Image: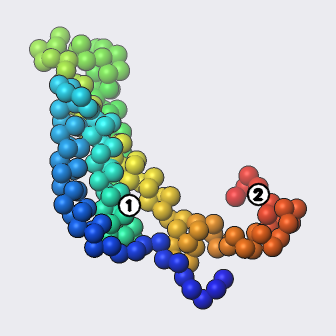
Amino acid sequence: MSGSVDDTYTESQVIMTAVKIIAPFTLTYGLFMTFHGGDAPGGGFQGGTIVGVTVLMLAFAFGIEPTRQWLRNSFITGLVTGGVVIFGAIGLGMITLGGGFLEFDRLYEVFHVKQKWGLEAVEIAGISLIVSGTIISLFFTMAAGFSPERPSGTGGISSDTNASEGPDSPAAEVSDDD
């Protein structure tokens, strides 16, 4: 490998300023989509996606590593795990009320509460957390393959190394064990 290192992050004042201006609006819109998904277009999936992409936008503007350090892995894991636990708890709660999994009719029969509120709880507290956490964690997982030491994400194998060796060489062989 040559002495020059191709860094994957380039600081741009235009992008950083644009993200500083746009990020609060996209975050607010994502939360709006999440909280008003039952009454308007949107929902937990769409809102969670927008919130997750807002974090990706911050990572593109200010660097992946600083954003990864700001959002610790335990926080992102907690988002996804918390969403799954809440989703499961609501579903199992309906079973304890005598219905089926996520059968919100039992809410009206037992508590005289509209079924809509059960769906809202699943959308807001469960699905939005799962989706936003998954998008962020997938991004950080894919970005982990790109670093100054491995700018191509190939694990240190440069493209000219593969080109000098023929397709029948052991280095060019790919196995399922990798």
Q: Amino acid at mark 1?
A: Asn
Q: Which residue is mark 2?
A: 174
Q: Residue at x 45, y 52 (%)?
A: 138
Q: Residue at x 73, y 55 (%)?
A: 177
Residue in the foreground of this view, choosing between 36 and 104 = 36
Mark 1 or 2, closer to the camera? 2
Characterize the local packing of mark 1: few (<14), some (14-19) or many (20 or more) Cα atoms within 10 angstroms.
Answer: some
Residue 73 disc label: 1
Q: From the viewer's perspective, tell me whether residue 1 is left or right of residue 133.
A: right
The earlier-in-sequence mark between 1 and 2 is: 1
The N terminus appears in which quarter of the rendering? Answer: bottom right
Q: Residue furthest top?
A: 109
Seen in the picture, residue 85 relative to 41 is either above or below; the reply is below
What separation in Å lies between label 1 and label 2 (alpha carbons)? 30 Å
Q: Quarter of the image holding residue 172?
A: bottom right
Q: Amino acid at mark 2?
A: Val
Image location of residue 23, percent across then percent down: 22, 56
The C terminus appears in which quarter of the rendering? Answer: bottom right
The tally of labels here is: 2
Residue in the foreground of this view, choosing between 70 and 91 = 70
Image location of residue 106, percent across then percent down: 23, 14
Image location of residue 115, percent across then percent down: 20, 18
Characterize the local packing of mark 2: few (<14), some (14-19) or many (20 or more) Cα atoms within 10 angstroms.
Answer: few
Residues at discs 1 and 2 in contact (Cβ within 8 Å): no
Residue 135 disc label: none
Q: Residue at x 80, y 60 (%)?
A: 173
Q: Quarter of the image holding residue 56?
A: bottom left
Seen in the picture, residue 31 relative to 18 is either above or below; the reply is above
Q: Secondary structure at mark 1?
A: helix
Q: Residue furthest bottom?
A: 3
